[in-house]
Image (cartoon, rainbow, N blue to C red):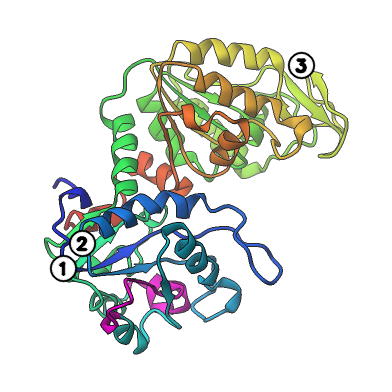
Amino acid sequence: MQLKSIDTAELKGKKVLARFDFNVPLTKTEPRQITDASRIDLALPTIRLMLEKGATKIVLMSHLGRPDGQPNPKYSLEPVATYLAEALGVDVVLTSSAVDSGVKEFLSLPETKIVLLENLRFSPEEEKNSSEFAEKLAMYGDIYVNDAFGAAHRKHASVHAINNFFKNRSYAGLLLSKEIQSLGYLMDRPKKPFVAVLGGAKVADKIKTIERLLVLVDKILIGGAMAYPFLKAHGHAIGKSLCSDEDVALAKQLIAQDRGGKLQLPSDHIVATTMDGEPTQSKTIGSEQMGLDIGLETLERYEHILKSAQTIFWNGPMGLFENKNFARGTMKIAEIIAHTESFSVVGGGDSVAAAHQSGFAEKFTHVSTGGGASLEFIERGELPGVQALRGIL
């Protein structure tokens, strides 16, 4: 069933209940400030569209952090309410809880246009996908909109069970629609050559993704700490590089599945004795050293492969890019992809931060907001929250 976009919804005179991903990083000290508001900024077009289409009330909901089903001021959405009010130029009322009796009072006030429910995860029923909790939330809207791609891989009440109460009245927000369209292109009709760039820490976290990509792509360029289990599986010395026995076993399994030589590994490295140590270019990794970035030879080889690609998916940095001594590989990969003519997708997580840090984020075709969600979509071709939105529960 086709996803219905909010573009097609008749909202005039309606109350809209909308799920967003406002799970933004906050400072650790009071008053808690938002350190990166990009997830909220990406939600603004959908909220503005709802206002333009004449919705009488807009009830926003989101989670923030992991409060473990208990109210915790540390995870309050108050900084989000303040930011939204400033960005939209309208009052945004924050409720004391997601399902308290005061919500209906706010909805009856003519001067109140936008209400933000307090953190959904203050209620344990949210993560339990409680139908009763979803029904209480559903009472706040005539129309349901899901624009929380970053939470769409979860079977939680506000993204999954809630769809039972909005038959033929559920819509995808602008951001979620774009995410599914862009990632769907990778799965359904990618132009060849299709090249994936995978980095980050653990093979175990991405084994299903790699297995799926081995079927879909022409080459997989491996970097970051993920490379060392593969190198060790091939018999190379990796010194003190980040690597677990479980990851080596999984790497061997993936190597055995790689019939066409699709897996490409670093042939040289930037090494140091500590994460704050002096960087050295090397073909080998000494017993007291650790690999912390890909080397120049590897970069040149990866660049050659990427320049001929028509479709590129990138997830995970090529090294410890938070330290400028080990950031060159990641920044250069971002630059190379940005200057290709390919359909390029950055798959959430640290790679998004790296893309923005490189200054080339706007040159990618699509920068995903959900790391876990984008990987699961590639693994399975669907997400529970999106299936529910389509009416498949």
Other-residue count near label 3 (Cα within 10 Å), few / some / many at <14 / 14–19 / ≥20: some
Foreground of the two, 373 or 45:
45
- Are the residues at dot 1 and dot 3 in contact (C-beta closer than 8 Å)? no
Stretch in magenta: 107-129
What residue did someone put label 3 on? 283
- Residue at 34% over, 89% down: 101
Dot 3 falls on a residue whose secondary structure is: loop
What amino acid does circle 1 point to?
Gly
- Are the residues at dot 2 and dot 1 in contact (C-beta closer than 8 Å)? yes
Left or right of 307? Residue 277 is right
| Label 2 – label 1 distance at C-alpha | 6 Å
Tell which tag, 1 or 3, sits nearer the viewer: 1
Q: Is residue 13 magenta?
A: no
Dot 1 falls on a residue whose secondary structure is: loop
What residue did someone put label 2 on? 54
What amino acid does circle 3 point to?
Lys
- Residue 257 placed where, x, y %? 44, 27
Q: Quadrant of the C terminus?
A: bottom left
Q: Mark 3 or 2 closer to N-term?
A: 2
Q: Is residue 360 above or below residue 71?
A: above
- Residue 35, by quadrant, is bottom right
What amino acid does circle 2 point to?
Gly
- Residue at 71% over, 19% down: 295
Q: Is residue 204 above or below residue 190?
A: below
Dot 2 falls on a residue whose secondary structure is: loop
- Residue 133, by quadrant, is bottom left
Q: Which mark is residue 94?
A: none
